[in-house]
Structures are given as C-alpha cells and as structure tokens.
C-alpha cells in the first residue's frame, strides 16, 4: 500500500518573520561601498611619518566610492618643518596600518594617526567624513583601530546633515589598546536619503603628548535604494543601535505602542507596551524590533552587543 501522506500545519506568522529575518540578514551582504579610505598613499615627505601640510592633502578623497576626509579641532592645524625643510603637520602622522577590513586585498600600508599634542590639547579633535546617502539607506561604518596606552581612550561618532549641528550616536571605549581590532557601528536612519551627510569621530582621553590612536581601512557601506517595503523601516527610530542595555524608541505618533523583539529565527524574546527596551539579558546578535501603533506596524534591525 502507498504510504499515507503527511499533513504538516505551519505557523505562517513565524514563517513570515523568519523570511523577513533572512531578508534583513541577506541585506548585510548586499550592501555597497559608499566610501573607503585605505591610507596607503599618504604624502609623507622625507621618509618621516608626518603628513605634508599642503592644501592638496586635506580634504582627502576616498580611495573607493565618493567622499572626503577632513581633520579639525585641537592642535591638528599646527605644523613643523622637517630636516628636508618640508612643512608637515605636527600631530597628524601615518604609522603602520593593518590588513583588517581591507578591500581588494589591499596591503596593510599606513594609517592616519592622531597624537595627544601639547598638554593633551588634541582631546576633542576629530576626523570628519563627508558622503552622500541620496537614494541609500542603512549606513554602517567599519574600520581598524589601535592606540598606545597613553593615547585616546574613547572615539565618539556623531552625524550631521549641515556640518554644524552634530548628534552623537556611538562611543567606542578602551581604544588605547596596542593591537589593531575591528570596530563596527550602525548610523541612525535619520541620514537615510540625505544628499549630504557628515560623520565625525571625536577623540578624547589621551594622557601624553605622543599618545595616539590609529585609523585604517575606514569603510562606509549602505543599501542601494530607500526601503519602500510594507515594513516602513523609517517609521520609528531607536537609540543607541548597536546597544548593550537600554534602547529608547521614538515615533511621531502618540498612540499606544506595542513593541515585540524577535531573534533571527523568528522567536519572540521581548514584548512590552512602552518605548524603553532593556536588552541587557539578550545574547549578542541581530534582532528584529516590531513596533505597532494603531493600524501601523514597522520593523527595524537592532544589533545587540
């Protein structure tokens, strides 16, 4: 006799969530480079480490994609003259780089390295990147960094659309370690679709003149095209993201909010009716946050560290 057919009942809600989770995960791999700096072609006259103090050096154009890197704050504009009578920046150097986060099998090469400066007055100095997010969404930043024990201990990222008013969104701590490591962070969705975006990383915590942080293989990636699917990902914002403990959700509606958090397999791990999420008990990874208000439901990706 032929075997009896087996009837399997499927939870369509869970399947939908799993498919959405897989789609979000796949988007990570479909992102395109907006701008990338490998720091391997720095103008270092006389065989030294100092950048040439010339208008052609900064803004520094991206090696891949489109964008400009500038420097500011503290004593970064100070110059000195080397043994070959070349005028170089005193506190902006290019020490050895890393092969972490490289594109196109780039060599380790150099880095852009900022020192603490006289009386540590480069605390508060910054690197600033200008890019375009026109018709792009879900911007992510990654780069290799290291320091010296007396170098800057924090790197704070902020965003702006006018180059004047900046909003902090991530502080990387303990950056004065002596081995290169990878930093990854996501930029708030406020920058999605903006024609001009400024991203600034501000340095603080240096305790000696020559203490430094190095940056190498600085990469900005985003999804090509604004998200127009049924989930309306820009309908609410979460801060901070990535997060370790408390996440605050904001929307433009005053209606009661129902928040559900799902893991990558579609399992609900949190559910509540207020705008403050405590994710401290969740394992590190990618989650989907679903916010429902009235007849509107939106979903965004949350990274828990």
Image (spheres, rainbow, N blue to C red):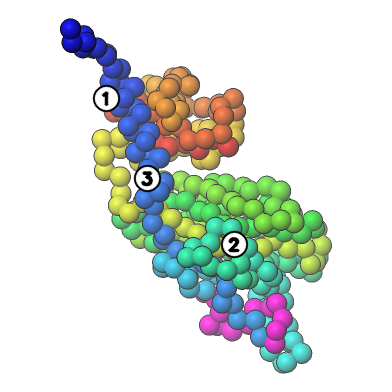
> Which residue extends farthest left?
1
Q: Is residue 16 left or right of residue 284?
A: left
- Which one is nearer the viewer's eye here, 282 or 194? 282
Callout 3: few (<14), some (14-19), or many (20+) C-alpha neighbours within 10 Å? some
Callout 1: few (<14), some (14-19), or many (20+) C-alpha neighbours within 10 Å? few
Mark with earlier residue (2, 1):
2
On screen, 107 above or below 161?
below
Residue identifier under label 2: 99
Residue identifier under label 3: 27
Do callouts 3 and 1 mark residues in contact (Cβ within 8 Å)? no
Mark 2 and mark 3: span between their CA atoms? 24 Å
Q: Position of residue 291 (x, y in %)?
A: 38, 28
On screen, 268 above or below 234?
above
Q: Is residue 265 left or right of residue 228?
A: right
| Residue at 63 percent of width and 48 percent of height | 172
| Residue 198 in view, yes or no | yes
Q: Which residues are magenta?
A: 46-59
Q: Is residue 53 magenta?
A: yes
Residue at disc 1, secondary structure: loop
| Residue at 43 percent of width and 55 percent of height | 221
Secondary structure mainly formed by the magenta segment: loop
| Residue 236 in view, yes or no | no
> Which residue extends farthest bottom?
85
Residue identifier under label 1: 295
Mark with earlier residue (2, 3):
3
Given this view, does label 2 or label 3 mark the residue nearer the observer?
A: 2
Residue at disc 2, secondary structure: loop
| Residue at 33 percent of width and 33 percent of height | 20
Q: Is residue 47 magenta?
A: yes
């Amino acid at each position: 006799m032929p075997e009896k057919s087996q009837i399997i009942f499927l939870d369509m809600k869970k399947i939908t969530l799993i498919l959405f989770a897989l789609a979000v995960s796949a988007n990570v791999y479909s992102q395109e480079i907006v701008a990338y700096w490998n720091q391997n072609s720095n103008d270092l006259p006389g065989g030294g480490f100092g950048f040439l103090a010339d208008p052609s050096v900064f803004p520094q154009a991206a090696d891949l994609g489109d964008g400009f890197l500038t420097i500011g704050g503290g004593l970064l504009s100070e110059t000195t003259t080397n043994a070959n009578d070349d005028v170089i920046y005193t506190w902006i150097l290019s020490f050895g780089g890393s092969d972490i986060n490289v594109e196109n099998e780039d060599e380790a090469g150099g880095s852009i390295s900022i020192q603490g400066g006289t009386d540590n007055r480069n605390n508060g100095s910054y690197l600033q990147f200008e890019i375009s997010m026109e018709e792009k969404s879900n911007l992510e930043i990654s780069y290799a960094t290291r320091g010296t024990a007396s170098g800057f201990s924090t790197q704070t990222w902020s965003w702006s659309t006018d180059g004047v008013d900046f909003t902090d969104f991530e502080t990387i701590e303990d950056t004065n370690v002596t081995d290169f490591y990878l930093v990854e962070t996501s930029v708030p969705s406020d920058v999605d679709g903006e024609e001009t975006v400024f991203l600034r990383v501000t340095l603080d915590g240096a305790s000696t003149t020559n203490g430094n942080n190095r940056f190498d293989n600085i990469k900005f990636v985003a999804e090509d095209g604004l998200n127009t699917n049924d989930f309306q990902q820009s309908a609410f914002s979460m801060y901070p993201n990535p997060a370790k403990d408390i996440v605050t959700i904001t929307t433009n509606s005053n209606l009661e909010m129902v928040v559900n958090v799902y893991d990558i397999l579609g399992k609900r791990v949190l559910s509540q009716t207020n705008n403050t999420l405590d994710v401290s008990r969740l394992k590190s990874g990618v989650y989907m946050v679903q916010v429902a208000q009235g007849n509107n439901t939106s979903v965004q990706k949350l990274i828990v560290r």
